[in-house]
Image (cartoon, grey):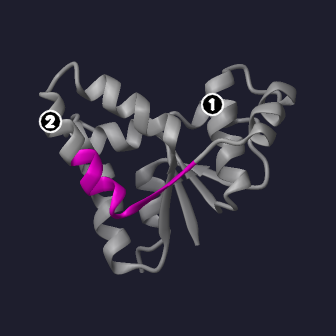
Amino acid sequence: MKVFLDSDIILDFLLKREPFFIEALQLFILKEKEDFKLYTSAIIISNVYYISSKQFPKPLIKQKIKELASIIQIVDSTRQSIYQSFESDFSDFEDAIQYHTALESKCTFFITRNTKDYKKAKNMRVLTAAQFCKLFVK
């Protein structure tokens, strides 16, 4: 199973943003117990670096992102995902790119805090981190 993480989930985890940190942390803890792979895009990594470096020293952010990269697959957005985004019904172009990048990477789930931004999503379940973790509660 492949699980794509949107920037808000990574930022919540990395910056320990309350009240969302716990949900993001639970997802990363769950990843250690369950058999699934985490994915994100190179664009998201760039955005995470930019936003994080406004609050913390750049060397610290670089180290944290390197650590994350050891457990998250970073995929590129392709020409195809860009063109599909232009043709999509998404109102936000960046959201469309992330969604189509996740689809192209054959992800099963798209994890975001802003599920309303992905109402046009098809062929992939869009959930919050808490909703995703609940799938594994027995």
9 vs 102, left or right, is left
Image coordinates of residue 76 in percent, x first then y, are 60, 46
Name the spot of residue 87 as percent of width and height, x first.
Answer: 87, 28
**How many discs mark residues in the rendered view?**
2
| Residue at 78% over, 55% down | 123
Residue count near mark 2 (Cα–Cα under 10 Å), binned few <14, some 14–19, many ≥20: few
Q: Which mark is residue 131?
A: none
Q: Quadrant of residue 51?
A: top left
Q: Secondary structure at mark 2?
A: helix
Q: Which residues are drawn in magenta?
A: 64-75
29 displayed left or right of 113: left
Q: Earlier in the sequence, mark 1 or mark 2?
A: 2
Q: Quadrant of the N terminus?
A: bottom right
From this viewpoint, which residue is outermost toward the right?
87
Mark 2 residue type: Pro
> What residue is drawn where x is 32% and y is 61%?
28
Question: Quick one: SS at disc 1?
Answer: helix
Query: Which label sits in the foreground, 1 or 2?
Result: 2
Is 76 above or below relative to 18? below
Asked if the residue under mark 2 is in contact with the one under mark 1, i.e. CB atoms within 8 Å, the reply is no
Mark 1 is surrounded, within 10 Å at the Cα level, by few (under 14), some (14 to 19) or many (20 or more) other residues, namely some
Coordinates of residue 31 in the picture (x, y in percent): 37, 70
**Label 2 belongs to which residue?**
59
Residue appearing at x 64%, y 60% in the figure: 107
Instruction: Tell me, yes or no, whether the highlighted magenta stretch contains residue 70.
Output: yes
Amino acid bearing label 1:
Asp
| Residue 16 highlighted magenta (yes or no) | no
Which residue bears the numbered disc 1? 95
The residue positioned 42% from the left and 80% from the top of the image is 138
Give residue 121's position: percent from left, percent from top. Answer: 74, 42
Q: Quadrant of residue 70?
A: bottom left
Q: CA distance from mark 1 to mark 2?
A: 28 Å
